[in-house]
Image (tube, rainbow, N blue to C red):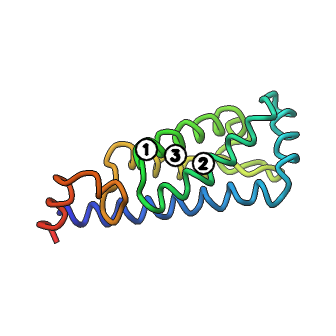
Amino acid sequence: MLLKNEIGALILRVTLGALFLVHGVVKFQGGIENIVGWFSSIELPGFMAYGVALLEIIGGIALIIGLGTRIVSTLFSLLMIGAILKVKLSVGLLGNGQMAGYELDLGFLAMAVYLVISGSKFLSIDQLFSKKDSNELRKAA
């Protein structure tokens, strides 16, 4: 049972990490200054665009390799709550034709919260630092 849960958490961890990584890279490829301007237009400090993009890239990589899964997932959870409340809530769950709704953000939030609660040690860098969990995973396999 433990191994099944860990495989499920691994799938969520790597998927969430890859999706955030791509979102962060796109922010820079599309011109981070455009994102800075957009942040300013919604009354957020423009410099936060850099922080969000870097969190998405660095945090995405960290999740993929399994480094600091619970911490990164907590930061992603807070990011998604902020995005939903500040930007997406007013356009609704499925959007309004001009802007996407918060359905994707809600999915990301659910994945991140799961990883905050359960963690994900299987095939992770974090596993190297936790002998007890490593031994349990080997026995379960």
Q: Is residue 44 left or right of residue 63?
A: right
Q: Is residue 48 left or right of residue 127?
A: right
The tag earlier along the polypeptide, 2 or 1, is 2
Circles 2 and 3: CB atoms closer than 8 Å? yes
Tag 1 secondary structure: helix
Name the mark on residue 105: 2
Q: Nearer the viewer, residue 55 or 91?
A: 55
Q: Residue at x 79, y 29 (%)?
A: 45
Tag 2 secondary structure: helix
Residue 92 place in picture, x, y as percent: 68, 42
Name the mark on residue 70: none
Give the amino acid at mark 2.
Answer: Asp
Does 32 sit above or below residue 85?
below
Q: In which quadrant of the rendered view does residue 31 lie?
A: bottom right
Q: Residue at x 68, y 54 (%)?
A: 24
Q: Residue at x 72, y 37 (%)?
A: 87
Marks 2/1: CA–CA distance? 12 Å
Give the residue pinned by disc 1.
113
Q: Is residue 51 left or right of residue 119?
A: right
Tag 3 secondary structure: helix
Q: Nearer the viewer, residue 106 or 128?
A: 128
Give the amino acid at mark 3.
Answer: Leu
Give the residue pinned by disc 3.
109
Please identify the quadrant where the C terminus is shown.
Answer: bottom left
**Label 1: how many residues lie within 10 Å, few (<14), some (14-19) or many (20+)?**
some
**Label 2: how many residues lie within 10 Å, few (<14), some (14-19) or many (20+)?**
many
Circles 1 and 3: CB atoms closer than 8 Å? yes
Give the amino acid at mark 1.
Answer: Val
Q: In which quadrant of the rendered view does residue 8 lie?
A: bottom left
